[in-house]
Image (cartoon, helix red, strand yellow):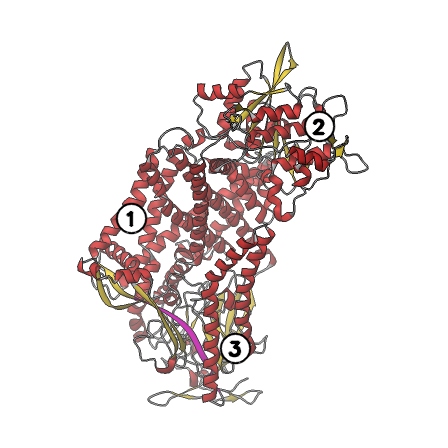
Amino acid sequence: MPTTSPTASSGDQQQQQLVEVGSEESGKSIQMAPSMDDPEGGLVQVVAGGEEDDDDDVETTTTTTEGADIVVAAAPSTDNDPESGGGVLSNAPSVSADEDDDNMYDEKEDVIGSLPPTTNDNNTTTTSLQQLFAPPLQFRDHHSLKGPSSSLVFQKKRYQIYPQRNSEFVLQQDRRTGKIVARQGKDGSIGLSFLRFLYAVVAVFMMGFVFVFCLQLLLFLFLGLTVSTGLTSSADMDWSQFFGTLLSVPLFVYSLACALALCAAFVGDAWNGHAFLDKATSLKGVPMQWINFCIFLGIPILVAICSLFARAEEWWKYTALTWFSCVFFLYCVFCVLVIYYEIMGTLELIRKYEKYTEVDSSSNLMDLLKYTLQMRQIQRFSGRVYRKYIIDGETVFNAKDSCRDRSMGDLVVSESTSTPLYTKLTQWNKLQDWGLVVDTDDVRQYSIDETRDVAPFVTADTWSLEKLFCRSRNKRFIAVINGKNALTHAQLTSSFACALIGNVLVILFVGSFLTWGGLSVGGVVFIIALATIAMSSSILQTVRLYDMVKRHRLMNRKKNDEVLENEIVYQVMESYRINKITPKVCWTLLALEVVVFYVWPVVTLFVIGNHPIAIFFLVSGIISLVRHYFNAASVLMEVGDINVLDEELTKMKSQFLAIDQSLTTEMEHVVEEDFHEKARLNLIVGKISHGNRRNVWIFTFAALVGIFCVLFLGAYALGSNEGSGTIPTSLPRETFVYEKQGAQDALPYPTCRMSSDIAIPGEEDTALMDYTFLSVIAYSDSDCKTLDGTPTDPTQEYLDNWFGAGFAKDEDEVVREYRERNDVSSAVQFKLISFNNLTVQTLDREDGFAVLTIRGTNNGWDALSDAQLWSAAWLAQAVRFVLPFGEIWTPILENLIYAISQIQSSSLKNVAYYKETKDFVEFLKQDSQFRNLRITGHSLGGGLAAITGAQTNTPAIALSGPNNMLSRNTFDPQLTKEQLDTLVFNIIPDKDPVPRIDDVAQLYQRIHCTASDANFVDCHTSTRSLCDILVTCGNKPRYDRPGRPTFCMCHDIFGYPQPTAKGNQTYADACSSAK
C-alpha cells in the first residue's frame, strides 16, 4: 500500500494525512483525504459521474490520488447538451466539503477511541480516524446516484451502502483501525435480471408502437396537405389552409420527439427497477413496488389464467392486449409525473434564484410564471459568445468560477472564442436604438453538465480506446496527464489515433456502401467530399487537442524532473450572454409564437375536417408549449447550480448542529426529500427534457418530414398522369421460344399453369405470364398520338402482339365514361381488358370475361398512397423484427395497427385508392359483359388488386404487391383472413422488399431474381419478373394454342439466356431489326 503523505495547509500549517482505501478483491487501493476547503470536516460526497447509459453499473475508480481531494465516482461518460456545450468541473475533483454540512452518522455510533498510528504489513503508516477526521467521516449522497445510500454498523464495522441496478457499492470502515475498503457486491439473481429484461422488452414494444403512431400522424398530416391542395381532385388550392397545416409541423415534431424521449426514459426506468417511479410519488417503497409488479406481471398473468380456464381459443391475444394496455397506462402515468415535477422544479428554481430579488417564498404563482417566461425568452433570443478553455487543474476550480474573470495565471493552457451569426445580428446598433435589445455585462450561462455537477475522469485505469471517438467534441472531461495515475503515452496516442481512424473509416464506409449500391463514381466522390467537409472540424479539433496535451505534458516534465502529484487537465466551454431583449420584445415574440405555431394550425385543422389530428394537436400542443416555456434546464443554465434546492436543509443546519451533532428524525426526512427532489430534477433535465435523447428524436422526425416534403413536392410537380410505361419491341412468337424447363434443368413453377376458374378461358398453360403481362401494361398510356398527330392506342398494340390480333380489347371508353359519369377525380389509374367471344358459364347464364389491371406507383402521390395504406404494417413488422421473441406479439399487431389508423380523417379515408377500384368493380359486375372478372396489378396496383378482390369476392392476382394480413382491419369494409387466404394470389420475386410488406396470405408464388444483392431494388421491376416467368415456364403452350412473344430485354438487359431460334434468323439479327 502507498504511504500517507502529509501536506501543509495555508495559515496554521495544519497537516492533512490520507486514509488508505483498499479493495479486498482486487488488491488495489485508493488514498482519501478530507476536503481542502474543510480541514476539520471531512464531508465526503459520493458521486455517480456517468449517466450516458442508465444500464451501466457504477464503476469504482481505484486509482491513487496523492495531494488531491477524495474521488469515489462512477466512471462512464456523461451526456452533454450540444446546445450549451461543455463546461468547467465544479470543485474538481468531484468532492464538496462544508464544515456546516449535516453529520450523516449517528454521533453515538461514530465515537472511536483515540488510537495511535499503527504499522501494517507493508511497513506503511495508517493514521486513526480520530487523528484524521474531526468530526468523524461523513457521507452525503450526490443527486446523480441511482438511489439513496444506507448507513449501518455490523460486526464492529461501519458500512455505507450505495444500491445499483443488480449490485451494491459498499464503503466499509473498520471502527478500530479506521481502514476503509471500497468493494462491489452482487445484489441480484438470474431470475431478477430476467424479470427486468422482460419488463424492458414489453416497454420497448410499447415504445415501438408509440413511434409508429408518431410517424403515422406526420404522414396523415402531409396526406391532408395533398387533399387540401387539390392533388386528389380538381378543386383549387386553399393557401390559408395549406400554410395553416404546414405551420403545425414544428410543434408536432417537438411534441413527438418529447414523447419518444419520455418513452426511452420509461424503458430505462423499467430496466433499472422503476427507480424514478419509486421516488416520484408518495407511494414510495412497498406500495409502488406492488403496483409495478401488478402492471408488468400480475394482471397479464391473471388474464392468461382466466382465459385458459375458459378455454378461449385466443387466450394469448387477450393476454398480450392486456399486457400492452397496462404498460401503456403506466407510461402515461410516468409522463404525467415527469411533466409535473419538471414544472414544479422550474418554479422552485425561480423562487430560490438569488438574482431574482422580486421573487421569494411569499411570491404568488403569477409572479413565478411571469419571471419564468421572461427568463426563457431572454435565454432563447439574446446574443451569446462561446469561449473554450483547456485548464490545468493544479488548484480547485469551481463550476461557477469563470476562466475569464478570475486570475488564472498559467492554468489556462489554451483559449478560443466563437461568436455565432445570430449574436452578431443582435449587436446591430439599430436594434438598440429601437429599444429591442439592451447591452449587458457578460452574464455567464452554465451548461447542463455544470449545473448537474457531473464530469468523467480519464485516468490510466478508466481509459478505453473508443471513448474519445464516441465522446462529443464539446464534452466536459477531466484528464490526468502527469503523475502516477496519468494516461500513458500509448493510451494518449491510441485514443487520438482511434478518433482519427474512426472518422476516416466512417467516410470510407459511406463511399463503399454507395459504390456497392450502384452510385456513379462522380456521385460517390461528391458524397465523400461532403462527408469530409462535415467531419473536418471534428478531425481538426481532435488533432489540436492531442497536440496541446502532448506539448503541455512535455513542458511540465521539463520543469520537474520527478512528478509526484497527479496533474489534471480538463476542457471547459463557457457561454456568456452579452445582451438581452427587452420585456416588450419578450411578450411580443411569445404571443407571435403561440398564435402562429399553435392557434392558427389548430383552427385550420378543425376547419378542413381533420378532427382526430386536430384534437391530438390541441392537447399535445398545450403540453409541449408548457414544457417548452417552463423549462427547468433553461432556468438551471441561468442559476448555475442544482443545489439551490437545498434551501430547507440550509435553514435547518445551524439549528440542529447547535443542539446536537446527531441527526433527528425530522432532519433525516429533510435530507431524504432533498436528495429525491434533486435526483428527480437531475434525471429529468439530463435525460428527458434537455438530453441527447430528445435531440436524436427531433433529428429523426425532422428527417422524416424532409422525406414527406420531397414526396409532396414530387406529387405536386408531376400530378397524377395516366402513365408512360413502354414495353420493348418483342421478337416473333414462333421464331424464338423459351422451352418449358424440365426436371433435367430445373422444375418450373407449380403455378405456371392455373386452373380454368382463375386463368383466361382456354389459356390455362400461360396463365401466370398472362397476368404478369397484364399488370405490366397498366403503366402504358391508352391515349397517344404519333408525330403526325394521328391518334394511337399503345395498349391495344401490346395486347394484339401478346395474345394475337382481335383476342383482347382495351376498354378505354368504358373507363373514361365511368370516370366522367361518377366524377372520379382520384389519381388511381386502371385499365379494363375484355376478351372477345370468351364467356364463362355461370348457373343459367353466360358471363363475359374481363381483367381489371391497376397501375402501380408512378408518381409522388402514388408513393404517399403506398405509405397511407401500408406504412403502419411495415413499421409494425420492423418493431416485431428487432425485438427478442417478437413473434409472440403477432396476434395483437392487427389490433394495434387498427387503433393507429383511427387518426385518419374521414376526408383522407375517402380518397384512398381502393375506394375507387372497389366501386368500379361493383359497377362492372352489374354488366354481364364484364361480370366474370379478374383483378391484377403490380406493386401498388397489386396491393389494391388484393384489397379490391377481397372486398368484392373477386379473384386477384398481384405481382410484387404488398400484403394485407396485418392491416386488414384498417380498410372499409374490413377484410377477413378467409377472404385473403382464398381470393388473393401474390407473385413474390426474390429480394424484392415490397411484397414482404405486411404478412403474406396462404396463396403465393416465389420466383427468381437474377439481380445482384446490391441492386435488389431492380427485383421489383415488373418487366424483369415477366422475363423470369417466360424463361422458367416457357412461352409455348402444350397444345395448339398460340405462344407468347419473347423480348430482347430479357437477355440484353436482365441477363437471362437467349431464346432458342426456330428459323434461320439469328437472335442478334432479330433484335437489331426489332430495334
User: Circle 3 — which element?
Assistant: loop
Q: What residue sits right under mark 1 in the picture?
A: 593
- Check the picture and name the quadrant holding the C terminus: top right
Q: What residue sits right under mark 2 in the picture?
A: 733
* Left or right of 755, for residue 470: left
Which label sits in the foreground, 3 or 2? 2
In the image, 722 versus 18, the foreground residue is 722
Q: Mark 1 or mark 3, which has the lower sequence index?
A: 3
User: For residue 842, what is the image quadrant?
Assistant: top right
Residue numbers of the magenta segment: 563-576
Label 1 close to label 3 by CB (< 8 Å): no
Q: Is residue 156 magenta?
A: no
User: Circle 2 — which element?
Assistant: loop
Residue lying farthest right? 744
Vertical relation: 439 (above or below) 17:
above
Circle 1: is it few (<14), some (14-19), or many (20+) Cα within 10 Å?
few
Circle 2: is it few (<14), some (14-19), or many (20+) Cα within 10 Å?
some
| CA gap, disc 1 and disc 2 | 69 Å
